[in-house]
């Protein structure tokens, strides 16, 4: 007999935000239904950018002793000793993959991570966030 494994992923960012802010982590269909309905309400009231900003300011990014590190602003200060706004470009590219692989699990930079770093720096250059010289400086291992 096939039993679907609901609760094994597939939530939208809005649903994850709702769960983290308002609901528990219990694995029940009733929680998932509440989460979906509350996500619809949030998406009606807020723009996608506002939802993404709230999510990025709430997301779990590590542990500092007994205290959890939530949000990219706090994580920037914890890991780099700098505000997110003042973070140098050779550090800011790392956020693109740290959520997927937390920083305390990264032992060495792989070829894939280097490719991702270079892609992010190229996109930051193309969008005008950093100069070409800053991008070249941030890519010491071409």
Image: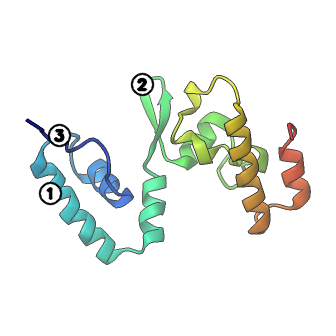
Residue matched to label 2 = 66
Q: Quadrant of residue 4?
A: top left
Q: In the displayed structure, would residue 51 be above or below residue 58?
A: below
Residue at the front extreme, as displayed: 1
Residues at discs 3 and 2 in contact (Cβ within 8 Å): no
Q: Quadrant of residue 131?
A: bottom right
Crowding near the residue tagged with mark 1, few <14, some 14–19, many ≥20 C-alpha atoms within 10 Å: few
Residue 27: which numbered mark, if any? 3
Say what secondary structure mark 2 lies in: loop
129 left or right, relative to 78? right
Residue that appears at 87% across and 39% down: 140
Residue matched to label 1 = 33
Tell me residue 121's x, y (percent).
Answer: 76, 54
Residue that appears at 67% across and 38% down: 112
86 left or right, relative to 104? right
Q: In the displayed structure, would residue 31 be above or below residue 5?
A: below
């Amino acid at each position: 007999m096939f039993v679907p494994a609901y609760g094994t992923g597939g939530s939208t960012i809005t649903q994850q935000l709702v769960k983290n802010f308002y609901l528990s982590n219990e694995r029940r269909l009733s929680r998932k239904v509440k989460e979906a309905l509350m996500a619809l309400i949030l998406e009606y009231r807020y723009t996608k950018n506002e939802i993404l900003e709230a999510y990025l300011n709430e997301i779990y990014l590590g542990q500092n002793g007994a205290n959890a590190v939530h949000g990219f602003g706090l994580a920037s200060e914890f890991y780099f000793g700098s505000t997110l706004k003042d973070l140098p470009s050779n550090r800011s590219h790392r956020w693109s993959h740290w959520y997927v692989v937390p920083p305390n699990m990264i032992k060495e930079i792989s070829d894939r991570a280097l490719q991702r770093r270079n892609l992010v720096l190229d996109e930051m250059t193309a969008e005008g966030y950093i100069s070409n010289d800053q991008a070249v400086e941030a890519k010491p291992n071409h």
